[in-house]
Amino acid sequence: SLQRRLTLCLYMSTSGAHEGTTTITVFFEGTANPIRPVVTQIGELFALCDALDVTDPQVAAGEASHLKMGFDGCGVVAGLPGALFAFGLAPQCDAVVARLEALASSSEACRQRLSVNVLGLSRGGIAALQLAKKLESASTALRDRLRLALLLFDPVPGNLVFTARHLDFLAAVGMPGVLTTASGVLDLSASPVSSVLAVYPHEPLPDIAFHAPLLPAYPPAAEVVEDATLGCHQGALYPVGLTRGSPVAAACRLSAHRLVDALRERGTRLRPAAGGGGAFASECLRDCEAALREPERASRRIAHCAGPAGATVRRARSARLLNRHHLELLAAEAPGEARARVEAAVAQPSAMPLFLLSVQRGGGEGGGASAAQRQALDALAWLERRGV
């Protein structure tokens, strides 16, 4: 009974019983992609995830401590309405919530933390945000045990920025997400998200492609990293083994390294594959250095963003480092060089910015220190926290 479960949980919490962790990793593919066969690194990582597949609600989790769920893109499951209007995402999120609630309500789960890592590409990234939104109304039993980490790769709602910002009158009267997908996930400040890694390829598509990315408002206590990277949307996330020698090879290598590291840091078990190891990290560092030497060409992607100021994904004309990922790679391999470049940017931010590729909320304008100064100071603080 419910009373018996609550009594058992209270006993275990007051008797010092060991608390374990159940890790469940959720994979949402991009709009037109199935999770199987493999099309992008989302499907590849789902296959490499060493966990019990509980996507089918009939599969019992049993005593497994590592679980996974994987979902086809909304265009695959809902056809044209999915491709145009993101239909099909809500039932997938409901299936995840149902699984999590079942885990949280079981008598065994009263001593287990639930570590939920959610990886999504494009509309799959929007699914991850919708899941976080749905978990705002999760049961107390689930919220008390939940650690929710989002790994977003170019989350794209499929709406024009102008439409979502100025024409979604239902969002303005408290009904977000009805007229535009974007408005339904712009505000996650009340969600149980604890950490976010959001990666945005910098190369823009024409406005008519409806591929403006989205940057929501997250809970104030959440640890959030938003970074720009090489490539154009899904073209930066094809499997590494299929792209060697191609123009997108470097972008795909950097994405693989970033996602594999992020998943493992958050407790997801992955079988060995491309995307890990010191040699691969060194290759990625060489990719970053090579990208800095490419011809100067500035670009920007306008993004959906909570608040009036907007946001952009930008490429500067020149810089000292490619992006935040480059800083992390360099700090691991040559910490002295990493610190020297950051300190140079702190001393002379107007001469050359720290990052060639960056995500800037508020357009990077006004408010005291410039965007370049804030970028450099934040990077220096990050190095000092790690003793570099």
Image (cartoon, grey):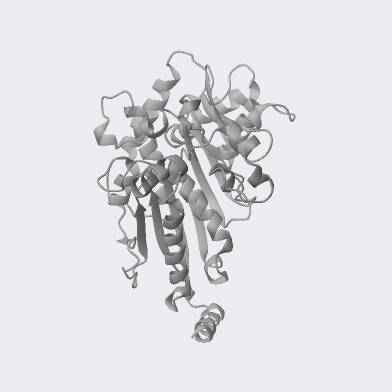
Residue 99 sits above or below residue 155 on the image: below
Residue 84 position, x and y percent, is: 44, 40
Residue drawn at x 51%, y 63% is 146
Residue 275 position, x and y percent, is: 33, 40
Residue drawn at x 43%, y 34% is 329
Residue 148 sits above or below residue 256 on the image: below
Question: Which residue ends up furthest to the top in the rendered image?
Answer: 295
Q: Quadrant of residue 21?
A: bottom left
Q: Quadrant of residue 29?
A: top left
Residue drawn at x 69%, y 48% is 173
How many numbered discs sit on the rendered protein? 0
Residue 100 position, x and y percent, is: 45, 65
Visible residue check, residue 105: yes
Visible residue check, residue 322: no
Residue drawn at x 40%, y 54% is 26
Residue 257 position, x and y percent, is: 37, 39
Q: Would residue 199 be found to the left or right of residue 137 on screen?
A: left
Of residues 309 and 262, the one nearer the viewer is 309
Of residues 371 and 320, the one nearer the viewer is 371
Q: Would residue 374 be found to the left or right of residue 185 on screen?
A: right
Q: Would residue 380 be found to the left or right of residue 107 on screen?
A: right
Residue 256 sits above or below residue 108 on the image: above
Of residues 308 and 114, the one nearer the viewer is 308
Q: Quadrant of residue 295?
A: top left
